[in-house]
């Protein structure tokens, strides 16, 4: 057998081995798929009724979803509304409510309208056409007077010591639903989360139609003082002034020494230090005043003793 025949035979065996390996891998994949539990829907309501303008929640919960995707669509429309958590319709009112590792894949429709009424389908992206669940949405005309009033306010300490922590909480309530987002600004500059100093946490309460945003600034410096503004996505705005106090500056003491301590002299605020000469001068003045008083008293006493006999004799002659 020549070398050409050997090469052809080797190539043949290589091709056969590659095909066999691919077939085995596919068979093992299909076998593992068959052994893995299939997705199944949990028992949730099938009919949902809301008033116009409310936040509509269409529930859909599954177990054993694995890596498969959940698709929401209207039964009358073949195009998907959402796949996973991504929206595929040009309608910002539509979103999917899902927590990581959770079983809930609820479809949310904010400010639901009368034309949103109909049948919706929650299905698993799979060849199995039975992995789908139908729910019905009923929308009734809403009472306009029952709608809430948008509100926003900031809570937190407005005075913080230097190197302390600034903590502000912004609460914003929407008319029909909670605002989508909140941004923070300091003196007109937008603040973003910084792992080293700035932290911004957000939480949404759908039942209260409120979004909460917590701003924390660690080890506040003098530059962190100013006007803090929180602004919602629907342009609600609230502001609060925060002052950072410099604890190193104190009107009572300077460098740990009482400014009213007479032993240290007179503290001159224009000079920024104790003037010992002023202290000595004031002390010399007090000493000179004391010695002058004693000397004057002594002279007056001597004069009185010396002059008293003469004065006494003259008085006697005068009266006689």
Image (spheres, helix red, strand yellow):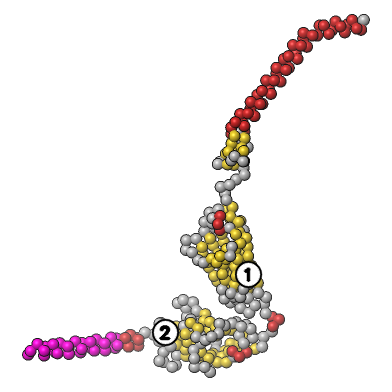
Most common SS among magenta residues: helix
Secondary element under disc 2, as helix, strand or loop, is: loop
Residue 221 lies, in percent from the top left, at 54, 55
Q: Residue at x 26, y 89 (%)?
A: 23
In the picture, the disc for residue 237 is 1
Is residue 203 placed above or below 74 in the rendered structure? above
Q: CA distance from mark 2 to mark 1?
A: 41 Å
Name the residue furthest front.
270
Q: In this picture, which residue range is highlighted in magenta? A: 1-28
In the picture, the disc for residue 68 is 2
Closer to the chain start, of discs 2 and 1, is 2
Q: Is residue 146 visible?
A: yes
Along the line of sight, which residue is nearer the eye, 103 or 285?
285
Residue 269 lies, in percent from the top left, at 62, 41
The answer to whether residue 19 is magenta is yes
Along the line of sight, which residue is nearer the eye, 284 or 219?
284
**Which quadrant: the C terminus?**
top right
Residue 130 lies, in percent from the top left, at 44, 93
Quarter where residue 49 is shown:
bottom right
Camera-side mark, 2 or 1: 1
Q: Residue at x 65, y 77 (%)?
A: 175
């Amino acid at each position: 057998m020549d070398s050409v025949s050997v090469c052809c035979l080797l190539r043949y065996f290589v091709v056969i081995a590659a095909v066999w390996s691919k077939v085995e891998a596919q068979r093992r994949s299909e076998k593992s798929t068959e052994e893995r539990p299939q997705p199944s829907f949990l028992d949730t309501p099938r009919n949902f009724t809301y008033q116009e303008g409310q936040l509509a929640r269409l529930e859909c919960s599954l177990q054993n979803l694995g890596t498969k995707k959940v698709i929401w669509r209207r039964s009358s429309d073949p195009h998907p509304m959402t796949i996973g958590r991504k929206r595929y319709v040009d309608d910002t009112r539509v979103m999917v409510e899902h927590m990581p590792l959770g079983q809930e894949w609820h479809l949310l429709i904010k400010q639901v309208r009368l034309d949103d009424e109909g049948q919706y389908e929650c299905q698993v992206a799979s060849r199995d056409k039975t992995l789908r669940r139908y729910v019905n949405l009923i929308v009734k005309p809403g009472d306009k007077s029952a709608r809430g009033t948008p509100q926003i306010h900031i809570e937190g300490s407005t005075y913080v010591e230097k190197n302390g922590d600034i903590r502000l909480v912004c609460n914003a309530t929407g008319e029909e639903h909670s605002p989508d987002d909140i941004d923070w600004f300091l003196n007109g500059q937008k603040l973003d989360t910084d792992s080293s100093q700035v932290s911004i946490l957000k939480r949404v309460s759908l039942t209260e139609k409120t979004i909460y945003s917590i701003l924390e600034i660690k080890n506040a410096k003098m530059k962190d003082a100013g006007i803090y503004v929180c602004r919602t996505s629907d342009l609600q705005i609230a502001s609060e002034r925060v002052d950072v106090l410099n604890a190193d500056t104190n009107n009572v003491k300077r460098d740990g020494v009482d400014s009213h301590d007479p032993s240290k002299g007179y503290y001159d605020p224009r000079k920024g230090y104790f003037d010992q000469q002023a202290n000595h001068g004031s002390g010399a003045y007090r000493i000179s005043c004391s010695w002058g008083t004693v000397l004057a008293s002594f002279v007056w006493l001597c004069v009185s003793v010396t002059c008293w006999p003469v004065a006494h004799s003259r008085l006697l002659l005068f009266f006689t």
